Image (cartoon, rainbow, N blue to C red):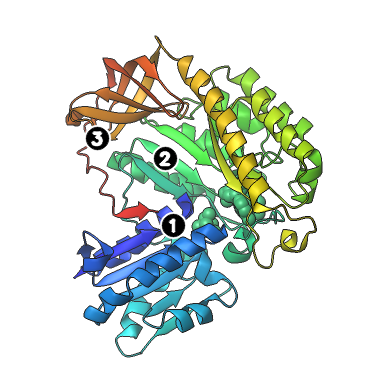
Amino acid sequence: MKYYINTYGCQMNVHESEKLAGILEEMGYTLADSDKTADVVVFNTCAIRESAEQKIFGNIGMLKSVKAANPNMIIAVCGCMSQQKGYPEMIVKKYPYVDIIFGTHNLAKFKEFLNKKKSQKRVVEVVETEDIKLRDSMEATRTSGTNAWVNITYGCNNFCTYCIVPYVRGREVSRPMQDIIDEVEKLLKKGFKQITLLGQNVNSYGNDIDDEKVNFANLLRELDKLDYKYRLRFMTSHPKDLSKEVIDAMANGKHICHYLHLPVQSGSDEILKKMNRHYDTKRYFSVIDMARKAMPDIEFSSDIIVGFPGETEEDFEDTINLVKKVRYQQLFTFIYSKRKGTVAEKMPNQVDIKTKKQRLSKLIEIEREIATEISQKYLGKKVEVLVEGIHPKKKGYLMGSTDFGKTISFEGDENLLGSFVSVLVDKANHTTLSGKIVDVLDKSNSEYNLPKDKVRRK
Ligand code: SAH
Ligand code: SF4
Ligand code: F3S
């Protein structure tokens, strides 16, 4: 019996698909080459923007004829889209051949749903709350090569006015600190070389736990004590909560990467207020300055939304100016998308799509120039690289990433996977560096399963 998982959205979903894969593999399923040849197909969905939803519906639609030819195929739809009000009913109506629908709070019951389906026409179970211990106890089939994802919080309390996440993921819940430390240590023992902590706002980790010592800075410091050669990353940081203590922990750490994904969303104070972000640009710049002072070699990335309701040309210019001032190594740019049930849905002065598209391309163009200049800083320099995979196109070449989060390619043997090497950079463009290995700093002796691509993100 074969399975296939189509994953959409953020790293949270990628990791949750790994957990669903864990259940399926334990039940004896193996990975199929494509969803068309699988006995169980899962759509782990995202609801962040309308475009994401349309893509998912299109892909579910494409399975109609496949399922008609193979009626035993089981199709399950789960994740953030299923969790939205009215969606399960709508999916049943438009795609009656979907067999199982569940939400973000009950993925631990997937095996039960599959068993129920044997005696039922369809299983639809979406609930509002969950026991996070159940989810934590799920064994993941890791699919990201040298990197392992580790949840530290679930849900979000911030209610940015454009965002659907708090509605589909529920309130923020932190995992106990010792559970996280134990999981990380287990992963490092197994040979993982990079740990990425996950939360919608990692900086508020521990706010819901009645113990002063349980906070993000202390969690970083505790994890940094683990005596293995590894990298520690985290996402996402919220500019309102990122503290000096966290920056100091980063600066003083042995393992914590000098890289910050710090979504700003807009460079206009007016818009930030309407977005309910709880910081202004002054605060944002002060965090950036604080981080740069503590770590002169740090690089930043960010998320920006263009065309939020009421965004004027001036507001957009403010965003451009902020981007030019901060100088991000990478930028994730989005056109504002109206989400049902959010505060911004009802805001006046929605921006027309033509203006949104123009703003997006202008922003991308400016960022491209900046990112190229940042990459070129590294020409002729040696950088420490974690070897993460085989180059998808160039034979004999490997791929990896720098501490500051840049992708880099270089010639080398497969047995270097999972090792740390020193690479002399000789080429640089806006997304990627390339160079030659000059030294092997730490040879991995773990036997690497190459990234199996079991969880393919779309
Ligand atoms: N919790 C993280 C990321 C949330 S989703 C954070 O606070 O940064 C990732 C990104 O999607 C957001 O940072 C935002 O830039 C974008 N996004 C969220 N809702 C959106 C919407 N309705 N339209 C367009 N982009 C959106
Ligand atoms: Fe959405 Fe804001 Fe929460 Fe991020 S912090 S998930 S943007 S509500
Ligand atoms: Fe992530 Fe999309 Fe859900 S971004 S939290 S999968 S809405």
Residue at left 44%, top 76%? Answer: 101
Relative image position of residue 354 (x, y in whole percent): 64, 49
Quarter occupied by the N terminus: bottom left
| Image height of 26 relative to 99, above or below | above
Residue beneath disc 3 = 393
Q: Secondary structure at mark 2?
A: strand
Badge 1 residue CB within 8 Å of ligand 3: yes
Relative image position of residue 454 (x, y in whole percent): 29, 54
| Image height of 402 relative to 18, above or below | above
Q: Which is more foreground, mark 3 or mark 1? A: 3
Image mark for residue 195:
2
Q: Amino acid at mark 3?
A: Lys
- Is the residue under label 2 in contact with that under label 1 (CB below 8 Å)? no
Name the N-terminal-most of marks 3 and 2. Answer: 2
Relative image position of residue 334 (x, y in whole percent): 58, 46
Image mark for residue 63:
none
What is the distance, in whole Å, between disc 3 and disc 2 at their CAs?
Answer: 27 Å
Q: Amino acid at mark 2?
A: Ile
Q: In front: 244, or 54?
A: 54
- Please tell me how crowded label 1 is: few (under 14), some (14-19), or many (20+) other residues with Cα within 10 Å: many
Q: Secondary structure at mark 3?
A: loop
Name the N-terminal-most of marks 3 and 1. Answer: 1
- Is the residue under label 2 in contact with that under label 3 (CB below 8 Å)? no
Judge from the rendering whether residue 226 lies leftward or rightward of residue 176; answer left or right.
left
Residue beneath disc 1 = 8
Q: Secondary structure at mark 1?
A: loop
Quarter location, residue 184:
top left
Camera sees residue 141: yes
Q: Amino acid at mark 1?
A: Tyr
Q: In front: 444, or 333?
A: 333
Badge 2 residue CB within 8 Å of ligand 1: no
What is the distance, in whole Å, between disc 3 and disc 1 at their CAs?
Answer: 24 Å
